[in-house]
Image (cartoon, rainbow, N blue to C red):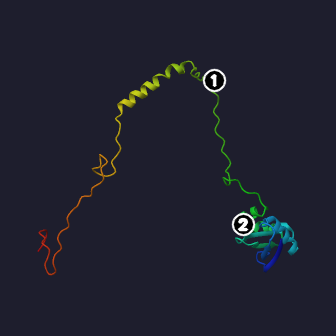
Amino acid sequence: MEIKILDDRPNPLLKRHEYRFQVDHATAATPSRDAVRSELSKLVHAPKDRVIIERMGARYGTAVTQGDAMVYETAEVARSTTREHILVRNGLKEKPAAGGPVAPKAEAPTEPAKAESPPAESPAKAPASAPAAPAEAKAEAKAEPKSEPKAAHKGDAKGEPHKSEHKPKAPKADKGEKPASTEGGT
């Protein structure tokens, strides 16, 4: 793996140097972000925790990867300036939980134990009442009329194709003649 720095721009406002780099990896697969960070830190003489790779990508069918990296003056500036997902990609921060920030759960109000609660039904009574439920369901099913499927269009009760109603248009008037209209004409 061979790294070449294509562009170096100082950015004193953000306390960093911005690099455009190219990695040649002719005999291997695209290198990992961590491996490129290690090699880049050696090349620019900076600790690895201050080197952050913003983006890195290889073109299809080539053994060349290009990317952008930032080398900050201090690790604290790097963590405060860089976006969170970039820190996660570079392994400098843990990935947040999938649900996002979780609000603290409110405690459910506890009810005092009731001393005189009625006893729960015994299992022996449950099977005796079980046959009554299906009989009631059958009676309700017989009472409800079965609905027929709705027709797609008006007049399609038998599933016949829809026949559009044809309304003849009024005859067009010749040039110079007024249409014969009996409504509100003077």
Badge 2 crowding class, 10 Å Cα cut-off, few under 14, some 14 to 19, many 20 or more, is few
116 with respect to 160 (left or right): right
Residue at left 87%, top 69%? 47
Give the spatial CA distance, label 1 vs label 2.
Answer: 58 Å
Q: Residue 167: name its quadrant.
A: bottom left
Of residues 29 and 141, which is closer to you in this image? Answer: 29
In the displayed structure, 5 sits above or below 49; it is below
Q: Secondary structure at mark 2?
A: loop
21 with respect to 165 (left or right): right
Badge 1 crowding class, 10 Å Cα cut-off, few under 14, some 14 to 19, many 20 or more, is few
Q: Is residue 73 visible?
A: no
Of callouts 1 and 2, the N-terminal one:
2
Q: Residue 107: name its quadrant.
A: top right
Tell me the quadrant of the picture where the C terminus can be found: bottom left
Q: Position of residue 106 (x, y in %)?
A: 65, 44
Residue at left 34%, top 41%? 148
Tell me the quadrant of the picture where the N terminus can be found: bottom right
Residue 115's disc number: 1
Which residue does the numbered mark 2 point to in the structure image? 83
Is there a contact, CB below 8 Å, between mark 1 and mark 2?
A: no
Q: Position of residue 97 (x, y in %)?
A: 70, 53
Q: Secondary structure at mark 1?
A: loop
Q: Position of residue 54 (x, y in %)?
A: 74, 70
Of residues 123 and 176, which is closer to you in this image? Answer: 176
Give, as a three-letter code, the residue at label 2.
Arg
Q: Is residue 170 visible?
A: yes
Q: Residue 33: name its quadrant.
A: bottom right
In the displayed structure, 22 sits above or below 146; it is below
127 with respect to 65 (left or right): left
Give, as a three-letter code, the residue at label 1.
Ala
Q: Position of residue 14 (x, y in %)?
A: 76, 75
